[in-house]
Amino acid sequence: MDAQETKKTVVCIEDEPEMIDLVRLILGRKGFELIGAMGGREGLETVRRVKPDLVLLDLMMPDIDGWEVYQQMKADPTLKDIPVIVVTAKAQSIDKVLGLHIAKVDDYVTKPFGPQELLQSVEKVLGMERAEENPNR
């Protein structure tokens, strides 16, 4: 398999470096290129520069929160079609989750998440479900 052509770029916007490292570890094993961005402001700059295949967006960040990043992305014609997976903490309120449905984010995962959960979400959003994942067919 020629990994170079299929390598997808993911920008992870997150204010905890260890979360970025964790995501890099999980997605790196599957051949994704992960670019970490610390916080919303840097995240937006990175997304504008890189134009990734997917954005993993933490909602709770001190500078610009995830909603603001999301809204700015959707308002930008060059960024609005990039899929976004929102990462929320389990403790966050239900209206945040309802907001996700209203805002039409592509998917969301709650922290703490397992590697499989994150990969499934990423592959689903990127339309990468592969036949070999269900060998019983």
Image (cartoon, rainbow, N blue to C red):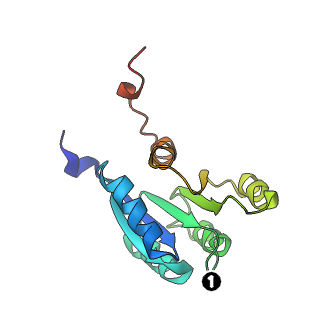
**CA neighbours of label 1 inside 10 A, class few (<14), some (14 to 19), many (20+):** few
Q: Residue at x 49, y 62 (%)?
A: 55
* Quarter of the figure with residue 25: bottom left
**Which residue is at the far right?**
95
66 horizontally vs 7: left or right: right
Type of amino acid under label 1:
Pro
**Which residue is at the far bottom?**
63
* Quarter of the figure with residue 50: bottom left
Answer whether residue 52 is visible to the viewer in this image.
no
97 horizontally vs 38: left or right: right
Answer whether residue 6 is visible to the viewer in this image.
yes
Instruction: Give residue 65's position: percent from left, percent from top.
Output: 64, 76
Quick one: SS at disc 1?
loop
Residue closer to the observer: 80 or 119: 119
Q: Residue at x 43, y 68 (%)?
A: 20
Look at the image and tell me in which quarter the C terminus lies: top left
Q: Vertical placement of 27 versus 59: above or below?
A: above
Instruction: Give residue 115's position: percent from left, percent from top.
Output: 45, 49
Instruction: Give residue 74's position: percent from left, percent from top.
Output: 61, 66
Q: Residue at x 73, y 51 (%)?
A: 101
**Which residue is at the far left?**
2
Residue position for label 1: 62
Look at the image and tell me in which quarter the N terminus lies: top left
Q: Residue at x 68, y 53 (%)?
A: 104
* Quarter of the figure with residue 9: bottom left
Task: State the count of labels.
Answer: 1
Residue closer to the observer: 18 or 133: 18
Q: Vertical placement of 84 versus 39: above or below?
A: above
52 horizontally vs 98: left or right: left
